[in-house]
Amino acid sequence: MSSHAPVLLLRHHRPFLAFWLARVFTASGFQMLTVAIGWNLYQLTGNVMDLGWVGLVEFAPRVLFMLHTGHVADRYDRRKIAALCQSLQALIALTLAVGSLTDSVTREMIFLLAFALGAARSFEMPATQALLPSIVPAALFPRAVAAAQSAQQSATIVAPAVGGLLYALGSVWVYGPTVLLYLIACLLMLNLPARQAALHTGKATLDSLLAGIRFIRSRPDVLGAISLDLFAVLLGGATALLPVFAKDILLTGPWGLGLLRSAPAVGALLMSLWLARFAVERKVGRIMFTAVGVFGVATIAFGLSTSFWFSLAVLVVLGAADMISMVIRASFVQLQTPDEMRGRVSAVNGLFIGASNQLGEFESGVTAHWLGTVPAVVLGGVGTLVVTGVWIKLFPGLANRDRMHEEHNG
């Protein structure tokens, strides 16, 4: 396959270009919204535990609606589902903008809107993930995953820093532009071609809703990959504590918080561009486990750092390592799943991703409250290394997996 595949995707697959741009605007909106909400909440309460609670509140809808989100993505038009969810997120940002103008934003209001944000994203994720395989040829899919992630990471580099700078002018200057970004993404999503394959028309029975779980359990390599991501990032993630590091340890302000949130995306973007051009084709299991191990080491280094610039550099490495694991996992999960089940399987995968991110934020807040911020992050990095070693023993087929498409399931 030509190393120019990502360029060909963007030039000659117009639906993929629209999808790619929609990811840019959605990711930009979410990252700016997250920076503003985190800083706004910490300013209101000064309580590190609240940063953990808001992550748990945002994660809760993934559990409550998990079985239904996948069924909806398999039964209805995935474009319209994604667009509706993006419209709801625009409404959330608009509510916060109005609240900022009227000085009526409260802790309770932020938690309520965080729940609504989590609900919208819980339906958006499986619909969006299931769309991509129907937009590009299967042979280009791994590169398409990396290219799509490069869009998201590009936005993640710029948007948090812009959000932090705008927040210095007032929170409404962040929430206002976020509304526009979500609406543009909504329009782009609606311009994608309709799915040609037949929709899943079965009723939402318990058996149908649980099909995605059964599918993943029947394939040990897939189960091992997504559960590795769950526990490694659950323990090693320190995103929720970045406001504390920025303000109390690295002694910076909202702009510094924005740069800290952008740093992992710099590493992720560089790595996604590399993977879009040169896809991982051999020793995929070994490479994925190595990347997760590097993620754990980088987490420990970040926790021990008292230098703002060294912290940024370590977060760049952390983001690059996480991107390798993500692209390998996402590629073979989607390629091994029939189209009529991709929504339900993506919903289960989304629960694992959400647990590792939002639930990981709650775990970080709790451990920081109990042990202190630095010990919590260092202990989490050590936990990631332990999980990596245990998973190599539990899933030897995954650890020894050579190619993305091989049928070896351990």
Image: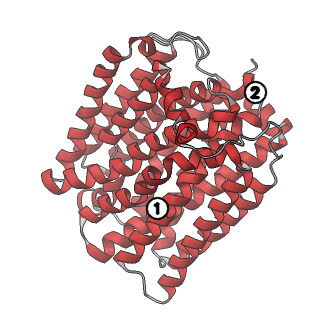
Mark 1 vs mark 2, CA separation in Å: 33 Å
Q: Residue at x 29, y 43 (%)?
A: 302
- Amino acid tagged 2: Ala
Residue 192 spot, x, y in % from top left: 80, 49
Secondary element at image label 2: helix
Residue 349 horizontal side relative to residue 404, left or right: left
Residue 286 occupies quadrant: top left
Q: How many marks?
A: 2
Task: Tell me which numbered mark, 1 or 2, is placed earlier along the sequence.
Answer: 2
Residue 47 spot, x, y in % from top left: 24, 68
- Please tell me which residue lies in front, 175 or 133: 133
Task: Tell me which colouring the rendered structure shows.
Answer: secondary structure
Instruction: Work out which residue is located at the far left of the displayed protein and give it.
Output: 371
Q: Is residue 125 above or below residue 215?
A: below
Secondary element at image label 1: helix
Residue 330 horizontal side relative to residue 164, left or right: right
Q: Residues within 10 Å of mark 2 (few under 14, many from 20)?
A: some
Residue 224 horizontal side relative to residue 308, left or right: right
- In this rendering, does residue 324 appear at all? yes
Asked if labels 2 and 1 touch by Cβ distance under 8 angstroms, the answer is no
Q: Is residue 128 above or below residue 91?
A: above
Residue 55 spot, x, y in % from top left: 37, 57
Q: Residue at x 43, y 68 (%)?
A: 37
- Please tell me which residue lies in front, 10 or 212: 212
- In this rendering, does residue 161 appear at all? no
- Amino acid tagged 1: Thr
Residue 169 spot, x, y in % from top left: 49, 78
Residue tagged by mark 1? Answer: 34
Q: Which mark is residue 5?
A: 2
